[in-house]
Image (cartoon, rainbow, N blue to C red):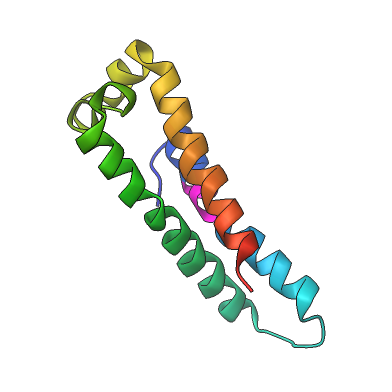
Amino acid sequence: MPANVVGLALFVAFLFPGYVYERRRRRDIPDRQRTPFQETLSVVFVGALADSALLLPTVLLAVFAPPWAPDVPALVARPGQYFTDHPLHCMALFLWIVGGGCVLAFAQP
């Protein structure tokens, strides 16, 4: 579980693609009843899958175009300092992964 408010916000944000998928699925297949446990598993796994699917292009961007990619070792080592030094990189990475994950989750049949 997250230890602070920022961790909680990131936790919820990275689960959001799974929520989008679950809502779309419920709209497309309204007659099927699922247990809360099944819905929770769907939200967690689809959210993780959608977010991780967007990490590969991010890693490729970091390898082939470093000026436009975030410095992941610096981000992991000193997240507060990195965010204050590079807020646009952090926001772009966050929007890319969460927003792109929501688009991927919504586009699933």
Relative depth, front residue between 38 and 61? 61
The magenta stretch is: 11-15
Q: How many marks?
A: 0
Q: Residue 107 appears at what percent x and percent y?
A: 63, 62
Task: Please identify the residue farthest to the top as the structure is shown.
Answer: 85
Relative depth, front residue between 75 and 1? 75
> Does 5 lie within the magenta span?
no
In this view, 105 is above or below 79: below
Q: Residue 9 appears at what percent x and percent y?
A: 52, 39
In this view, 55 is above or below 109: above
Q: Quadrant of the C terminus?
A: bottom right
Task: Please identify the residue farthest to the front as the structure is shown.
Answer: 64
Q: Identify which residue is drawn at 42% across, 17% down.
A: 87
Asked if residue 16 shows in the view, the reply is no
Q: Quadrant of residue 29?
A: bottom right
- Main secondary structure along the magenta-highlighted residues: helix
Q: Residue 5 appears at what percent x and percent y?
A: 48, 34
